[in-house]
Image (tube, rainbow, N blue to C red):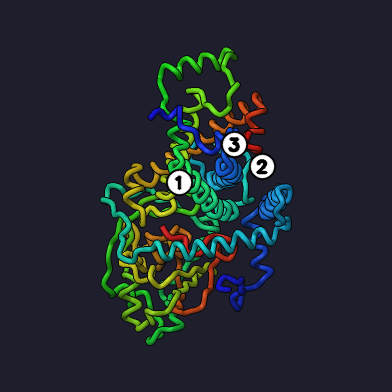
Amino acid sequence: MSTSTQRTPSQDLGLIHPLYVRITHWVNAIAIFIMVASGWQIYNASPLLAFAFPPSLTLGGWLAGGLLWHFAGMWLFVGNGLLYLVLGLKRGHFRRKFLPIRATDVVADLGAAVTGRLSHADLSVYNAVQKLFYLGVLIAGVVIVASGLALWKPVQFKELAALLGGYESARLVHFFAMASIVLFLVIHVAMAVLVPRSLRAMICGR
Amino acid sequence: MRHALKRPPGVNAELLVQDAARLLPDASRRRFLRQVASLGALATLTGCDITDAPSAEKALRKISEFNDWVQARLFNPNRLATTYPDSAVTRPFPFNAYYPEAEAPDVDEERYRLILDGRIANKQPWTLPQLAELPQETQITRLVCVEGWSAIGKWTGIPLRSFLERVGADLTAKYVHFVCAEGYSSSIDMPTALHPQTQMTLAFDGQTLPTRFGFPMRIRIPTKLGFKNPKHVIGMTVLNNYTGGYWEDQGYNWFSGL
């Protein structure tokens, strides 16, 4: 049975994004904002690299405030993320939307994107670059939670910390996972601004 | 409410405020509240009503208490922190405190007494030579600071568990509270106090514990963040009431387990 002939309830309703995707998307947006801004506050207490984040872009006011936000926001981020993953797997959302990703399609679509010839006529179908991006940020999300757990509990979850190369290495992994998510966000928001219909679809569903 | 902020007796409120002001020279505390307010404003737009900063901070502290509960359940009393070879020790080992290194308290070795209080059968104060006579262990473990950095150190001292057993402490009590020569304080849960790697440290890297690392005695807990490893400890109380601590009262998570 080909997946392309399968009709899902959301497609029958003419929906681009089902309700659970829209809700978890916006809850995630809030959670990401809290986690990144408070994470930058924590980073500034002992910068890992040779720079610090502008204090005006951080949340919490000082280290303790940043930590309170970060360890509250984690429940929202993880809880919401798990809900999205479970529903996405159960309903075949990931398989249908993100797979397959073919290298030739990525090259072709990337070329079309930079020359401004990429079609956005059907927002319910992702092009190969989008698929790669959304799957990539999903993986970054899993990595940031795993490295976060290793940093929070390097003794209780010491196998996980060891898997990431130890505590100090887990700090780097956590940082670069954040950097990839923020990079994704910059492009993601820029694209939404370029194709405003996509923003409407993520709010109204169509 | 376990975490209600009770001022410990004998704390001068004015001095405490001065301390806090010194810690936060850029009025960042106020910025914290302002940011909470702006986030609250954002929340109002979305239909929620948590506009006032104190209630937002209260909510965050509530979640922090929930995180204490979660961490106590995640804590495995038999799970040991990774130990390292001598070659892995960070040398020089970083100094970190809420005061500059030059202001670390000079504790008089002769006059030093460890005062015991609370649910302990034998409250006889301990001198440093008496403590030094007790069986000791050495551990090479990683100290993880709340700021994010970490360093590997070599600590030698008396397992806290054996000391608590020796003085007849009530091991079913909830907390052990530590008071320090410079006015610092912290408290820990009993399961952590009884953890095999929790130590009353008397020596660092083969030398008598230097002033900057907490002479004459510090509590070393490789299963907790660095600020829960109090230096210059002069008092130990076993009790069932939550007592918080210097940083915990200002918003650091109390359990702070690793």
Q: Is residue B113 above or below residue A26?
A: below
Please, what secondary structure does the residue beneath circle 2 have? helix
The residue that label 3 is drawn on is A13
The residue that label 1 is drawn on is A86
Closer to the camera in the image, B66 or B46? B46
Chain containing mark 3: A
Kind of residue sitting beneath label 1: Val
Density class for disc 2 (Cα within 10 Å; few <14, some 14-19, many ≥20) is: few
Kind of residue sitting beneath label 2: Ser
Q: Earlier in the sequence, mark 3 or mark 1?
A: 3
Q: Earlier in the sequence, mark 3 or mark 2?
A: 3
The residue that label 2 is drawn on is A56
Density class for disc 1 (Cα within 10 Å; few <14, some 14-19, many ≥20) is: few
- In front: label 3 or label 2: 3
Residue A91 image point, x, y percent: 46, 41
**Which image quarter holds the C terminus of chain B?**
bottom left
Chain containing mark 2: A
Respond whether the residues carrying marks 2 and 1 are from the same subunit: yes
Residue B211 image point, x, y percent: 44, 61
Q: Does residue B174 show up?
A: yes
CA–CA distance between discs 3 and 1? 22 Å
Taking A53 as reference, is B67 left or right?
A: left
Image disc number at residue B182? none
Please, what secondary structure does the residue beneath circle 1 have? helix
Q: Tell me which residue sits at (61%, 71%) in the image.
A: B5
CA–CA distance between discs 3 and 2? 44 Å
